[in-house]
Image (tube, coloured by chain):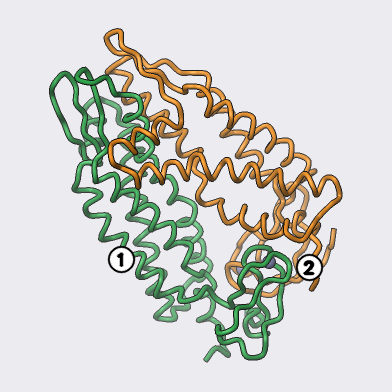
Amino acid sequence: MNQQTRIACHECDLLQQLKPPPPGGCARCPRCGAVLHRSKRNSLNRTLALSLAGLILFMIANAFPFLAFEMQGQITETRLFTGVTDLYHQGMWGLAALVLFTTIIVPAVQLMLMLYVLIPIKLGRTPGHLAGVFRLLQNLTPWGMMEVFMLGILVSVVKLAGMATIVPGLALWAFGLLIFVLAAAAAALDPHQVWEKVRYAP
Amino acid sequence: MKPWPPSAVHQSLIGCPSCELLCKAPARFDGQIRMRCPRCGATLHTRKPNSLARTWALVIAAFIFYIPANILPIMTVTSLGKTQSDTIMSGVAYLLLHGMWPLALLIFFASVVVPLLKLMILIYLLISVQLRSPWRPRDRTRLYRITEAVGRWSMVDIYVVTILVALVHLGNLAAIRAETGAVFFGAVVVITIFAALTFDPRLIWDSLEKNHE
Ligand SMILES: [Zn+2]
Ligand SMILES: [Zn+2]
């Protein structure tokens, strides 16, 4: 790893040498305190493994019902996607699109792009277009809101608990695990290591 | 205060917003030419373009949408022939009345306090940058980081409505419909996320530079 990279802080524009972070800690900008680089052991392998696990959990979470609602003998089951279609059928296409984008499209695209970038790097092949793909992947980050959706599920369960019987489905467990795996993958990723591996012509 | 060396912009250098590669700015960099990062292809700007004007526009739009988001109902519950519409606040009141105060507090905080606080902080940052305030730039940068991090949690009410709509459709027995308030509320959340993205925290530090015109 290149030990002496000169960078401009992304939050205050101070020019500085990017120092390697202490083990388990992070390097901060001396002027504004922005985190410039966090120490991560075995970053790319761990991110790759967690992203693979995440993709499998994501498919399970989408394939099966995550909650069932029982009232006077009648049962409705809900998958992630039925919320989107129900909103759409009520004429709320804007809301449907927002929920579809933030809870299904962005997480799915992010997981797939992560594998698309990391697998070639593991195989030692780094074509230049990987950089553009990785940039897109990072720009999507503010729009993936799985953990907020999980909180939404918990709130809904508590709200409905007094009104009817709520039965958790298989997807709910996959979903809970997925939140942890996604958080772990985000924490394991060291973007500097990806950028350093990408070839480019200065 | 300890004097800092001049920022990258004063040494004709631009840090790539995506991959942090330090790039040389061309001699006449007036925004007419589009310069791209040689490594990741991101468009390079010394500062985010029109940051103040764009952030102001988004903040004002979010404030305008915040009003119908709170006045209009976000959902309608039909149960055994009775129909009841809920706004964000009446939803919070319902939770309080039924003894679910931790949940009431959570929803109140995520749906009412967070968007308002985020808008207030952005307005304060915008004004302080325009007045070229030298006051505690480190703390103001920290405030900016908070607005970036907390905004997403406001989405929780949108997701609750989505899940309730999907779960409760038993015809006349019980059904829940999403209402227009939720659309405005979703718009507020999206607009405030964009507002935080268009604000450039480096502007906070620019007013401290001595040799800045
Ligand atoms: Zn800094
Ligand atoms: Zn770049």
Q: Quadrant of the N terminus of chain B?
A: bottom right
Q: Is residue A44 left or right of residue B101?
A: right
Residue drawn at point x = 69 percent, y = 64 percent: B40
Q: Nearer the viewer, mark 2 or mark 1?
A: 1
- Residue B144 on image: x %, y %: 48, 62
- Residue B53 on image: x %, y %: 39, 75
Tell me the kind of residue under disc 1. Ile
Q: Nearer the viewer, residue B138 or A91?
A: A91
Count of numbered marks:
2
Tell me the kind of residue under disc 2. Thr
Q: Nearer the viewer, residue A202 or B197?
A: A202
- The image shows residue A74, relative to residue A90, as above or below, that is above
Q: Give the drawing colour for chain B.
A: green
Q: Is residue A140 left or right of residue A73?
A: right
**Discs 2 and 1 lie in a common subunit:** no
- Residue A42 on image: x %, y %: 80, 43
Describe the element under mark 2 as helix, strand or loop: strand
* Chain orange in the figure, letter: A
Indicate if the residue with disc 2 has its beta carbon within 8 Å of ligand 2: no
Label 2 packing within 10 angstroms: few (<14), some (14-19), many (20+): some
Label 1 packing within 10 angstroms: few (<14), some (14-19), many (20+): some
Question: Which residue is labeled 1 in the image?
Answer: B60
Q: Is residue A66 left or right of residue A76?
A: right
Quarter of the picture for ligand 2?
A: bottom right
Question: Which residue is labeled 2 in the image?
Answer: A5
Describe the element under mark 1 as helix, strand or loop: helix
Residue drawn at point x = 80 percent, y = 49 percent: A121
- The image shows residue B109, relative to residue A28, as above or below, that is above
